[in-house]
Amino acid sequence: MLKAKRKLGVVFFPAYDWAISATHPERQERLLYTQDQLREEGLFDIPGVTEYKPELASWLDVDRAHFCFPDVESVATQSHCVSAGGAIRAAKLVMEREADRAFALIRPPGHHAMKVVHGSRGFCNINIEAVMIEWVREHYGRKRVAIVDTDCHHGDGTQDIYWHDPDTLFISLHQDGRTLYPGTGFPMEAGGPRALGRTINVPLPPGTSDEGFLHVIDNLVLPILSDFKPDLIVNSAGQDNHFSDPITDMNFSARGYAVLSERLGPHLAVLEGGYAIQGALPYVNLGIALALAGLDYSHVREPGFDPDKCRQSAKITEYIKEITPQIADFYFDPPKTPKTGRFEGETYIREKEIHYDTDNIHEDQTETLHLCGDCPGLLVIESRSTVNPPCLGVEIPALACPRCHDLGLRAFEEAQIKSGYRHVQLINRKDKEYQRFLV
Amino acid sequence: MLLGIDVGGTHTDAVLLDLGGIVATRKVKTDHADLLGSIAAVLEGVLASVDPAKVLRLNLSTTLSTNAIVEGKSEPVGVFVSCGPGIDPEYYRVGGHYFLIGGAVDHRGTALEDVNEAALCAAVEKCRADGVRVFASVGKFSTRNPEHEEAILEKVHPLADFVTSGRRVSGQLGFHRRINTAYFNSSVWRLFNRFADAVQRCVASHGLRCQVNILKADGGAMPLSVSRRAPVESILSGPAASVMGIIAICDIDLDSVILDIGGTTTDIAVFADGAPLIAQTGISISGKPTLVRAFKTRSIGIGGDSAIAVEGGLVTAGPQRYGPSMADGGEVPTLIDAFNVQNIIAYGDTMASYSGISELAMESGLDPETLADYAIGYAANRIREETALLIREINEKPVYTIFELLEGKFVRPAKVYVMGGPARAFATVLREAFSLPVLVPENHAVANAAGAALARATVDVELFADTQKGRMFIPGLGVERAVPPSYSLDQARAEAVDNLRDYLGAIETEDPDLPVDILEESVFNMIEDSRLAGRSIRVKCQVKPGVAEAYKRGIKRQC
């Protein structure tokens, strides 16, 4: 008799009436065959496994995590709000102890969406994990969160959002940026001056198979997690590392994903990419769901899986063994200063150029963190893009000291009166106030 | 005239109706050792003064298959399972002759792996040696490609009196449920067919030459000839008869809750848009989920004979039932006794009720009226809570499009209908608990049999087409054909409806123009290398449960 060892809530939302375009990989039927497989397997008949429907994330929920210019409505459709709402629903299940684990099997994805949003990049508009995590923090207090991103593409959006946050550990395993979009995610990208070692990037060579991924999980991810002691572990469960994925070059299997999920044991798994919708997703999703629920997944095997053909080369094995301890050091013994950006007086400044490939937008950004001795510091971002006039975002952290709090409010006011900014947004986590001003 | 017989757990009821209303009714105690005897007794009763030739139809609701399954008195079945990757099919083992014979079909119906001939032959030999005569042939995704079920069928055929093919029990997905449904169907096949033979002889000996139908759990009627191949469809039709009863005597247009209160349990059903809601998947029997279509219901252990108890100062009722109420000569005070004490009813030996409740009240330091009041209040609240959970579950039903999520319909009950023996006793307190109009329809005593008598055919059909593969399937009806690449959703919809109507014609329903609802329809482009490779088309349609309208006029009541 099958019975879940851990209560699993699955928020399944395939958004059958939404796509970027008719032939885009991120389209209506992406989860169709997954749905068929889960129904035929009777996943939701298993005692302890329950299906839930998503909520609709509000604009306020999005405003907590992002500077959306000119506003949320212009950059995110209702489908994005449903997807983020699906993640929120999953988090609520776990936070309210209705489930031990939750799997948000939702689309569209979000991990390429950065702090500032002018449009869609890498099929992502808003970062659904970040919207979810900030929702959790708003309602359940300041949680220590670890995000383990196992999508094949570097989770550059999530990295950008949590770059300065020492309470959020972001670990990304992905195909080496020299060979795949978005071209980032190298080990020296280790976080801002106040959160060095809280961003950990593990670029893996094309052709990496189960062995390589699991080596990194066992020898890097798990030791770091046991040191960081997060309140919540979130897995950005992209499935495009699969050997049959049409847009990547890795050799991961459905079985491998299930083992990874079991060892990682995330409270929340959120679907990201994965575009082998017939040959991989139905099996990978089933494997992840079974593993999260503590159920036997030993018979989950996708068609065409030949362990010998998929096995990574000895060279790859050796390379991964070599880099794993070096990368782990970025957490255990982080560099003293960030490799990028510059210090100017009491501030740390990053200049960024961001390309939105899906919407073909270019953005130039100046991000300023006020280095305060008493709090995480005020964050101010100036943004200029090809679709919007100059914009300004001001974020007062939840733990802001009175000085940074005043500084932030003043910056928001001044920007409205005497500056060249068109759109000004304030994220005031201290007072839970979110404001937007059109100059 | 139409005749309805409801073989219930306690009583067997028969109702004879004509266009003007009820002509005759008859009630006897059900003899579980001799169901046919009970049927013959009520038949004789209602036909005593009527010309049997005028009876156009007999609808029968029977517990035969249910009891056989629940009591484990069914026949051993050789279950042959072609499984493929996924959850280990060993978990779905059922009965003593369960064989995994390899083979794999994927979600699109592509055969990935052949069945294992050697394993198949060995399993057949084992069944031959053990004298197994009925079989179930079940494949994962067999609704998308039947070839492995066919291969099994061919091998077991020489040995078999009967084989259930998994895809014929339903077009729905659900491998575990398909296995259970096929298993149960074969396990009661022989027993049911003997019963059907006896019913036919019995009916003929009473001079009836009408069509005989069997009631299903979704409130539909199926001809006896059809039920001989699908006896599993007759399980748990009892609650369905009572829901059909309420449809027969009331016009329900608002979202409503139906409470059928019996001696031990209360069955809760929900109406939306004037029709009872059908469960998304299927009914469970003996703790095993099946694909048998049924009303969405919830059953709780609160009934007229629920025992009252006091624990830690808290007065409760049910789920235990130790026998009849003290008013009926029982030993333990029940809700009926509480109603007697509160003067809501005056049933049976009211003095016995009073002394029983008094004794319990004394032990717990309450006065008898208060104890009775608390017990009744507890029962009403339990019913209200469980109803709220059922409504919540219905409204939380997952949806898969943004449109449905934003525009989806919510069920908000505006009325409560109460049926069953203790219905009148409960009405007042339920009115307070629900803050909604509560109605107790007249004639509810014979409503079940009347509902059975008037039930018309129901059927649901799922069509699945893959234009890249050039195939179309309607698994429940065994329809399969080649389709051109241009095959469209419009064609699929028309074809599904046509096949459903053909089926209704084949089973000789008297009303071939029954309304067909399209429940779901979708078309997805299949893209390969950024080019359109084909379409995946799905259509699900049904004939909803309903009653013979012409006869309804005669028994309809204000409600």
Image (tube, coloured by chain):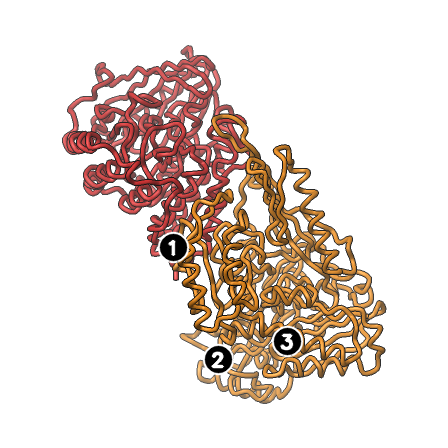
Chain colours: A red, B orange
Residue in the picture at 43% in, 51% down:
B103
Up-down: is B348 above or below B271? below
Q: Is residue A247 left or right of residue B246?
A: left
| Rendered location of residue A99, percent (x, y) | 38, 51
| Rendered location of residue A287, percent (x, y) | 37, 46
Q: Earlier in the sequence, mark 1 or mark 2?
A: 1
For residue A27, which numbered disc appears in the image?
A: none
Q: Is residue B134 left or right of residue A170?
A: right
Residue A430 in view (yes/no): no
Classed neighbour count for the residue bearing mark 3: other residues with Cα under 10 Å, few (<14), some (14–19), many (≥20): some
Classed neighbour count for the residue bearing mark 2: other residues with Cα under 10 Å, few (<14), some (14–19), many (≥20): some
* Discs 1, 2: same chain: yes
Residue B253 in view (yes/no): yes
Identify the element where label 2 is drawn.
Answer: loop
| Rendered location of residue A338, percent (x, y) | 21, 21
Identify the element where label 1 is drawn.
Answer: loop
Q: Nearer the viewer, mark 1 or mark 2?
A: 1
Q: Nearer the viewer, mark 2 or mark 3?
A: 3
Quadrant position of residue B408? top right
Marks 2/3: CA–CA distance: 53 Å
Marks 1/3: CA–CA distance: 37 Å
Chain containing the residue with disc 1:
B
For residue B88, which numbered disc appears in the image?
A: 1
Q: Which residue is mark 3?
A: B195
Up-down: is A131 above or below A292? above
Q: Which residue is mark 2?
A: B366
Q: Check disc 3 and give the amino acid type.
A: Phe
Q: Check disc 2 and give the amino acid type.
A: Leu
Q: Earlier in the sequence, mark 2 or mark 3?
A: 3
Chain containing the residue with disc 2:
B
Q: Check disc 1 and give the amino acid type.
A: Asp
